[in-house]
Image (tube, helix red, strand yellow):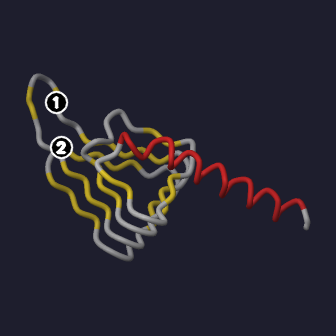
Amino acid sequence: MNFLKIQRKYKNLRSRVFTALVRPSFGSIGRGSLIHPPFHSNNARGIFIGENCSIFWDGWLDAVFQYAGEKFQPHLEIGNDTYIGRRCHIIACGHLRIGRNV
């Protein structure tokens, strides 16, 4: 096995462990979905990720419940089989839905 295959396996394992550790902080994370570290979120309980999704490095997903004294009911929903690329920032104050296979 060459070094690049070993590196790929290590990154995949690291992402699986990271996803398992952050799962309780989210509204939900579907089966087969991975969040690749580093990842940023100040409040993930309003974020619902479907099955078989990939959120890649340096992503920032946030659900804003309060800002400047105003309260919100955010709901960020990411559909099944969706890919969120590197350094993508998505922030929801209201209801935001990203469909399937995006």
Q: Between 98 and 22, which is closer to the camera in this rendering?
A: 22
Q: Indicate the secondary structure of the residue bearing disc 1.
A: strand
Query: Can you give x and y, in whole percent of width and height, for residue 19 in the image?
Result: 51, 49
Q: Earlier in the sequence, mark 1 or mark 2?
A: 1
Quick one: quadrant of the C terminus? bottom left
User: Residue at the location (58% across, 53% down)?
Assistant: 16
Query: Can you give x and y, in whole percent of width and height, for residue 90 in the image?
Result: 33, 50
Q: Which residue is mark 2?
A: 93
Query: Can you give x and y, in whole percent of width and height, for residue 6 in the image?
Result: 82, 59
27 to the left or right of 35: left
71 to the left or right of 93: left
Q: Which residue is mark 1?
A: 66
Q: Which amino acid does the dot numbered 2 rest on?
A: Cys
Query: Can you give x and y, in whole percent of width and height, for residue 14 in the image?
Result: 65, 49
User: Residue at the location (36% across, 71% down)?
Assistant: 80
User: Residue at the location (38% across, 76% down)?
Assistant: 101
Q: Please, is residue 93 above or below residue 86 in the view?
A: above
Residue, far top: 69
User: Residue at the location (74% across, 61% down)?
Assistant: 8
Q: From mark 1 to mark 2, how far is it between C-alphas?
A: 8 Å
